[in-house]
Amino acid sequence: MSPLLEDTLSSVIAALESGVAPWRKSWSAGEIPSIPLRSTGDAFSGMNAILLSSLQAVRGYDSPFWLTFNQAQEIGGHVRKGERAAPAIFYKTRSVDGDAADGSDDKVLRFLKSYGVFNACQIEGLPETYHPVAPSEPAVIAPLNADVVAIMEHFPVAVSHGGDVACYHVLSDRISMPPRSAFESDEDYVAVLLHEYGHATGAKHRLDRFEPNVTRTDYAREELVAELTSHLTSMHLGINPSRSVFENHVAYLGHWAGFLKEKPSELLKAAGKAQAAADMILSYRNAGSQGANATLAEAA
């Protein structure tokens, strides 16, 4: 693992130990979190989206664009002296032919590598398109926009409302949620629901993520996946929950920090699983919107 990536993961662990989930900082100021973008405008995903969105918030960058040193130069920009790169991650695979003499099978070797990227705010001379102008007033998010409504209607897990506990029931494959009126805002309600949808993607007939004999570490690991799933999905949907949403998961912070200290790669694994879960959830936003009124009426 590269020193740049090791330093960044160490800062994430330190934040968890201090009681802060760094990927949630982007919501503390009431602004809608922006998906980190490549120089081409394509969105980063998985661990890259989590780490870079955290850095955007912590460092106060108002541009979502991240470029390599060479990419900046190619379009006439230059990184300011003294600016430090952030790590972006990519995976490479290499096929190795087996030895026919001893009958060994072909193998696919996987490598994790990182490279440095700079936010557009660290670069001078870039075209204005890399510095989107923020609206003069905060954007107003319509409660339960069309994408959220479509997901709620078509995601294949029943959601019942009542009581004061949000949870996913593995055996019955259903979700329990408090009524929307129990939350500070509709955005908070949706963020918690996305956390539970994140758990539901782990069912055997979906992404098959659950271990047969669950330990405390396994439970905390799954909570981390669900939390990152909610974060990634929220960014795609423009959902802006309050910091209070995360307070329900503060008890896991110390445990997350503990096993990430022993195995920093666990954060990368959790991010990969969260991206797969987010992709599954988001796939239901294009499924249509018929029959949504009944779902929303029950939620209220």
Image (spheres, helix red, strand yellow):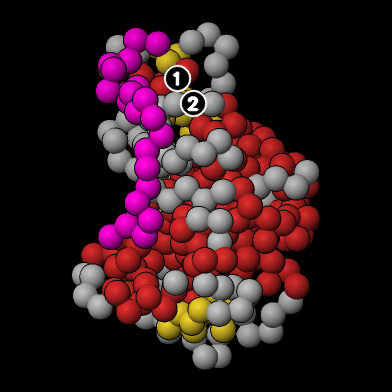
In this picture, is 46 found above or below 82?
below
Residue 17 in percent (x, y) is at: 78, 47
Residue 131 in percent (x, y) is at: 35, 22
Whether residue 33 appears in magenta in the rendering, the answer is: no
Sequence order check: which comes first, mark 1 or mark 2? 2
| Res. 40 in view | yes
Residue at the spot of label 2: 61
Q: Residue at x 47, y 48 (%)?
A: 240
Query: Outermost residue, bottom direction?
Result: 172
Q: Answer left or right for 109 relative to 169.
A: left
In which quadrant will I find the C terminus?
bottom left
Q: Are marks 1 and 2 in contact (CB under 8 Å)?
A: yes
Query: What secondary structure is found at the residue carrying circle 2?
Result: loop
Q: Residue at x 28, y 33 (%)?
A: 40
In magenta, the rendered stretch is 124-146
- Magenta segment main secondary structure: loop
Whether residue 135 appears in magenta in the rendering, the answer is: yes
Closer to the camera in the image, 188 or 238: 188
Q: Residue at x 63, y 52 (%)?
A: 244
Q: CA distance from mark 1 to mark 2?
A: 6 Å
In which quadrant will I find the N terminus?
top right
Residue 87 in percent (x, y) is at: 53, 35
The disc labelled 2 sits on which kind of residue? Tyr
In this picture, is 139 found above or below 233?
above
Residue at the spot of label 1: 121
Closer to the camera in the image, 31 or 181: 181
